[in-house]
Image (cartoon, helix red, strand yellow):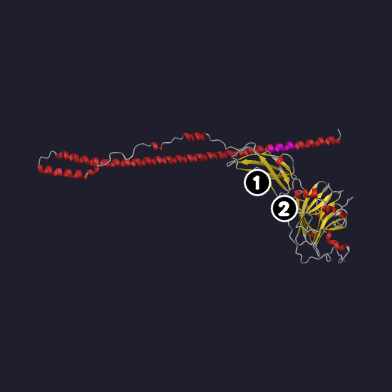
Amino acid sequence: MDSEALQRIISTLASKNDEIQNFIDTLNHTLKGVQENSSNILSELDEEFDSLYSILDEVKESMINSIKQEQAHKSQELQSQISQCNNALENSEELLEFATRSLDIKEPEEFSKAARQIKDRYVTMASAFRLSLKPKVSDNMTHLMVDFSQERQMLQTLKFLPVPKAPEIDPVECLVADNCVTVAWRMPEEDNKIDHFVLEYRKTNFDGLPRVKDERCWEIADNIKGTEYTLSGLKFDSKYMNFRVRACNKAVAGEYSDPVTLETKALNFSLDNSSSHLNLKVEDTCVEWDPTGGKGQEKIKGKENKGSVHVTSLKKHTRSGTPSPKRTSVGSRPPAVRGSRDRFTGESYTVLGDTAIESGQHYWEVKAQKDCKSYSVGVAYKTLGKFDQLGKTNTSWCVHVNNWLQNTFAAKHNNKVKALDVSVPEKIGVFCDFDGGQLSFYDANSKQLLYSFKTKFTQPVLPGFMVWCGGLSLSTGMQVPSAVRTLQKSENGMTGSASSLNNVTQ
C-alpha cells in the first residue's frame, strides 16, 4: 500500500468519525430535548387538570347554592302558611269554646248578647276561614337532580391532541436561484385539520445532516398556508443551508420533517487592505479615496467580518478641499503636465479582493457614490502592482467611468480603450467565467449587457477596483443571476465588436 492509498483511508476514517460524532451529538441533544419536553408536558398536563378541577368545583358550588336557595324559598313559603294557619286555628278554637259555653246560658238577654258577639267575631274571622288549604310549594326537589353520565363518558374519552404527521420535503422540487431558495413539501397523507406550516432554516458550511454543535440558530418563517415557500434576497455566505418544516393544526405543531441540505455556494470576498493604495480608506466591502492617506490613519484590518450580510456604507468626506488630479501630490510630485503619465495618477488608486478565482462562474456587484469622479471595476492577476492601473497592463481587465471634466465610459485592457455607447448604470454587475475565459459587465438592475471580454485566464484572478474622489461599495455572496446565464448563452454582438481588446495572456 502506497502513501496515497493510506491517505485516502485516513481521510475516509476521519470523515466517518466526524459523522459518527455528529450523530452522537444529535442523539445527546435529542435525549436532552426529550427530558426537557417531557417535564414541560407534565407541567402543562397538571395545569390542564387543575383547570378542570377548578371548573368542576365552581360548578358544584353553584349547584349547591341553587339547592340551598330552593330549600330556603320553599321552607319560607311553608313556614308562612303554617303560621297563618296556626293563627286562624287558634282564633277558631277560641270562638268555638266561647260558643260552646254560650249554649249553657239560660238568660235570654245574656244568650242574645253572647250570640251577637259570636256572630260579630265569626264575621271578623271569615277571611281566616278563606285561607287556601293547599301548600304553596311542594316538597319535590327532583328538578335539581343531576345526571353526569354523559359528562363522565366524555371525561373518559379525554386523550392527547391529534398531532399532524411530519411533512416530506422534496429536494427535486426545491430550487436555488437568484439568491432565492424555494422549498417544496407534501404531507404523507391528507389532513384537512392542518392550519399552517412552519419552515425553519439556517446557514451551514457542512454537507449532510444538520449538526448540533458550532452551528447558527434556526430562523423561522411562520404561518405558511401552502406547501411551498420562497426565501428571497438571501446572501449566500455559506456553502449550504439546512431546511426543515412542520405542520400545525389549531392546537399543536407536529413533528419536523427530515432535514434537507441545499447547496448555496457563491463567491464571497472582502477588499484586501494590504493590496490597496495608501490614499484609499478600505473596509471589508467598501473603499473610499482619502487625500490625507487613509492607511496612515488606521491599522490594517483583518477579515473577521468577511461574509457580512449587509453592505456597509462609508460616510462621505467633505469634498470642498479636494484637489484635482493636477493638485494631487504623492510625496513632492510637481503639477502634472497634460499628456504625461501623471495625468492618469488617479487611475492607480487600486485595491484588490482577498479571494482568488481559480475556476467556475462568479458574480458580484459594485455601486459608486453619486459624486464619485472616477472609478474602475474589473479583475486582475495577483501580479498587479500597487501603482499599476487597471486595464493598462495585459494582466488586468476593467470598465472605467470618468465623471471629471468630461463623462466617459470605456472598457480597458492592455493599454487599449474601447468607448462604450451605453449609459453608466447605478450599479454594475460583474460576471466572471474563469473556465470559459469570459468577463462581462452588466447593468445590475436591468441586466443589460454593457461589455464582454473574451480571453484565456492562465492564472487565478482577483476582483480589482480603482476609485478617485469618491467611494465604492460591494455586494458579494451572490449567485449568477438567471438573466445573466440566459444572456451568456446568446451573447455575441458586443464581444465581436471589441476584438481588439480580447487576447490570451501568458
Can residue 24 be found in the magenta stretch?
yes
Q: How many numbered tags mark residues here? A: 2
Which residue extends farthest right? 506
Q: Are marks 2 and 1 in contact (CB under 8 Å)?
A: no
Which label belongs to residue 310? 2
Identify which amino acid the numbered label 1 is placed on. Ala
Residue 88 seen in render: yes
SS class of the residue under badge 1?
A: strand
Q: Is residue 258 left or right of residue 124?
A: right
Closest to the observer, 461 or 271? 461
Can residue 123 be found in the magenta stretch?
no
Image coordinates for residue 438, horizontal then vertical, percent: 83, 50
User: Which mark is first along the chain, 1 or 2?
Assistant: 1
Image coordinates for residue 124, horizontal then vertical, percent: 21, 45
Q: Which residues are magenta?
A: 18-26
Identify which amino acid the numbered label 2 is placed on. His
- Quadrant in which residue 281 is drawn: bottom right
Give me the C-alpha separation between circle 2 and circle 1: 20 Å
Image coordinates for residue 104, horizontal then vertical, percent: 13, 38
Q: Residue at x 70, y 49 (%)?
A: 232
Closest to the observer, 42 or 423? 423
Residue 210 seen in render: no
Image coordinates for residue 454, horizontal then vertical, percent: 85, 51
Name the residue carrying label 1.
Answer: 221
